[in-house]
Image (cartoon, rainbow, N blue to C red):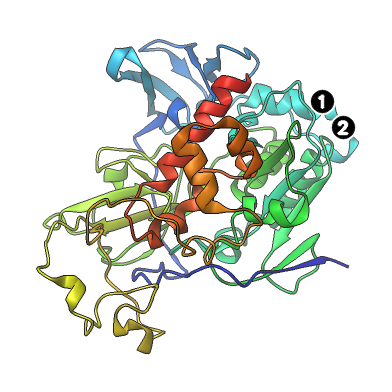
């Protein structure tokens, strides 16, 4: 019998551009990017140089603090370039694919017959270990640690998120193998959003019901000194295929979504795909923001960017640079959505809106309000946690729940914030301070 989690708080953002449930295109990228910036807490050390030949599964980067944590190439080919930013910060390793799809053979194994250390060793050598994220702080897991549990959210409620049933309908056996493998490391909690048999059933259709942090807070809240690990369905599918075939296969269905997309649907591709490979899905005449992930917590990678390692969604949204004079005094705006019934959009509950990036106002004084608690279904005081992060007060951050949250959990708070604060950045800064001071 599964545990039932009833969630009432939250908000679904009615943005247009949901992907039709069909894969319109298979994109075999000429070049893929392995980005260490996708992995919080990963300090990269280069293992290759330009011109080196690599196979799918060949190590490309290692973590300076934990040399056994590797990032491997998703394709076979040649190292084409090393991309660096300010102060020579390593941003990406570019691999030009040769189309041969040759891969390192790690050996097919039945995970049910393996011990924890054997599973851990395979995940580390294959480069799939970074799929596992630790809470608190959202960093790559230290292989020497043992968590109190592992959590998997089997659905997403983020705006225009990929439909899990469609995206993973061909990966069921692989996902089951992945669950079997990681269950050797700790007890696994799987959360679904239906009446199907599962470890936990989440009754709640509003975002952020699909956030694993929300689910953890209702099942096993994180206390000081405790750690939990989290995985996505993408991770479980990749881990399962590794054990079933002995080879790395990061192929995934990616939802191409957003108001400016001409034909919102799915593509089959790999992480590290150039965003430019989606040409034909968007109009070049429209100034567009290219987001790897969803519009609330995804990364603005630009047209010259790449699909993130953890993402199976790309969101394309118009850059909103128009100014509206006395917009606050115009309640009869049926083409604008308001979460607080400021406009009469609440009379059209099924309407989808061609939203853009315009925040409709500048940053104002931070005020105490209950708007955050209305959309955050977690047992904490969001206003006080945000203020503690702003003040850099570690004791208060601990008191008000910094161990339980990541910036993505506050994405809706940022959306409804009347003061227009970048709340996710505030929480991220607080987490960075905790990592620095508590190390």
Image: 255 above or below 225: below
* The image quarter in which residue 31 lies: top left
Q: Nearer the viewer, residue 336 or 115?
A: 336
- Does residue 104 appear anywhere in the picture? yes
Q: Residue at x 9, y 68 (%)?
A: 325
Q: Residue at x 35, y 38 (%)?
A: 306
Say whether marks 2 and 1 touch (CB < 8 Å). yes
Image: 204 above or below 216: below
Q: Position of 419 compared to 135: left or right?
A: left
Q: Position of 411 compared to 228: left or right?
A: left
Pointer 1: what residue? 118
Query: Where in the figure is residue 373, as x and y percent of width and height?
Result: 54, 62
SS class, disc 1: helix
Q: Position of 360 compared to 341: left or right?
A: left
Q: Nearer the viewer, residue 221 or 289?
A: 221
Q: Nearer the viewer, residue 339 or 396?
A: 396
Image: 75 above or below 406: above
* The image quarter in which residue 267 lies: bottom left
Query: Where in the figure is residue 241, as x and y percent of width and height?
Result: 67, 42
Q: Residue at x 65, y 58 (%)?
A: 154
Q: CA distance from mark 2 to mark 1?
A: 6 Å
Q: Position of 304 compared to 341: left or right?
A: left
Query: Where in the figure is residue 113, as x and y percent of width and height?
Result: 90, 36
SS class, disc 2: loop
- Quarter of the image where the N terminus is located: bottom right
Pointer 2: what residue? 114
């Amino acid at each position: 019998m599964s545990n039932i989690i009833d969630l009432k708080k939250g908000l679904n953002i009615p943005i247009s551009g949901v992907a039709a449930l069909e894969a319109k295109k298979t994109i075999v990228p000429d070049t893929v990017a392995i980005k260490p910036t996708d992995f919080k807490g990963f300090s990269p050390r280069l293992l290759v140089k330009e011109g080196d030949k690599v196979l799918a599964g060949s190590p490309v980067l290692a973590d300076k603090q934990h040399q056994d944590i590797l990032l491997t190439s998703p394709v076979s080919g040649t190292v084409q370039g090393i991309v660096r930013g300010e102060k020579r910060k390593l941003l990406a390793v570019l691999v030009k694919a040769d189309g041969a799809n040759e891969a390192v053979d790690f050996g097919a194994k039945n995970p049910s017959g393996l011990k924890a250390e054997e599973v851990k060793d395979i995940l580390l050598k294959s480069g799939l270990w970074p799929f596992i994220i630790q809470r608190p702080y959202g960093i790559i897991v230290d292989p020497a640690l043992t968590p109190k549990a592992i959590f998997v959210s089997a659905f997403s409620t983020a705006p225009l998120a990929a439909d899990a049933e469609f995206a993973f309908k061909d990966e069921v056996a692989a996902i089951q193998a992945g669950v079997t493998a990681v269950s050797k490391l700790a007890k696994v909690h799987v959360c679904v959003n239906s009446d199907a048999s599962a470890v936990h059933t989440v009754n709640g259709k509003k975002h952020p019901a699909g956030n694993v942090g929300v689910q953890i807070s209702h099942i096993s809240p994180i206390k000081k000194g405790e750690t939990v690990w989290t995985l996505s369905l993408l991770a479980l599918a990749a881990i399962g295929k590794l054990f079933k075939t002995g080879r790395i296969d990061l192929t995934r269905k990616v939802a191409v979504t957003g108001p400016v997309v001409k034909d919102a649907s799915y593509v089959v591709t790999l992480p590290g795909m150039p965003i430019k490979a989606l040409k034909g899905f968007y109009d070049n005449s429209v100034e567009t923001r290219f987001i790897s992930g969803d519009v609330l917590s995804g990364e603005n990678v630009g047209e010259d960017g790449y699909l993130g390692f953890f993402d199976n969604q790309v969101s394309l949204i118009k850059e909103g640079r128009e100014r509206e004079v006395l917009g606050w005094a115009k309640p009869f705006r049926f083409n604008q959505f308001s979460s607080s019934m400021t406009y009469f959009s609440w009379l059209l509950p099924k309407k989808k809106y061609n939203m853009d990036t315009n925040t409709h106002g500048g940053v104002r004084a931070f005020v105490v309000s209950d708007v955050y608690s209305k959309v955050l279904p977690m047992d904490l005081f969001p206003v006080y946690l945000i203020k503690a992060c702003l003040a850099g007060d570690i004791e208060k951050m601990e008191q008000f729940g910094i161990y339980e949250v990541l910036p993505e959990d506050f994405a809706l708070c940022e959306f409804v914030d009347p003061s227009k604060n970048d709340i996710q950045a505030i929480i991220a800064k607080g987490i960075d301070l905790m990592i620095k001071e508590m190390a």
